[in-house]
Amino acid sequence: MRSLFEFSTDASGKAIATCPLFWDCECDGEDYIHPVTADECPVCKARREEQPDSRVNEVMYHADKLPPGLVGIMESMLEDTGEPIPF
């Protein structure tokens, strides 16, 4: 089964996991994570197709502000994966 998550490292070599169910816009503060169902950030006007997928740990941290259905899918996939998720 193909993983929903993409595993890589950041510039400092720290392992990270991203999820395509959410994406990051250019906004500062806490409202920079958007669901894949949103094509554009209403504040900074960043477009989903031009922005990176969100980091799993950041989605989980802000989960209470995000669509519960998509967060639930991600949580289920986290439980089903045999790979360690970097937090």
Image (cartoon, grey):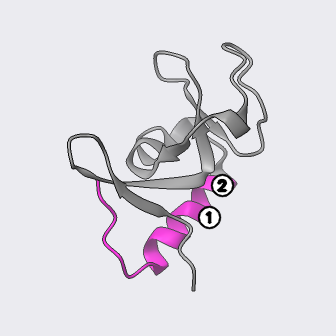
Identify the residue at the far bottom of this view.
1
Please identify the quadrant where the N terminus is shown: bottom right
Q: Which residues are magenta?
A: 69-87
Left/right of residue 25 with respect to residue 56 in the rendered view: right
Q: Disc 2 marks which amino acid?
A: Leu
Residue 21 or residue 26, whichever sits in front: 26
Judge from the rendering whether residue 38 lies leftward or rightward of residue 1; answer left or right.
right
**Residue where numbered disc 1 is placed:** 73
Q: Main secondary structure of the magenta part?
A: helix
**Element carrying mark 2:** helix
Q: Quadrant of residue 26?
A: top right
Query: Could you tell me which residue is drawn at 73 percent across and 29 percent down?
Result: 47
Q: Residues within 10 Å of mark 2 (few under 14, many from 20)?
A: some
Q: Residue 44, position in %: x, y?
A: 66, 14
Marking on residue 49: none
Q: Amino acid at mark 1?
A: Ile
Q: Can you identify the residue that label 2 sits on?
A: 70
Q: CA distance from mark 1 to mark 2?
A: 5 Å
Query: Is 74 covered by the magenta stretch?
Result: yes
- Magenta-drawn stretch contains 28: no
Residues at badges 1 and 2 in contact (C-beta under 8 Å)? yes
Q: In the picture provided, is 6 more to the left or to the right than 8? A: right
Residue 32 position in % (x across, y down) = 55, 26
Q: Is residue 37 above or below residue 32?
A: below
Instruction: Identify the residue shown where x is 55% and y is 24%.
Output: 31
In the image, residue 72 sits, relative to residue 42, either above or below, namely below
- Which sits in the foreground, 58 or 62? 58
- Identified at 68% across, 23% down, the residue is 46
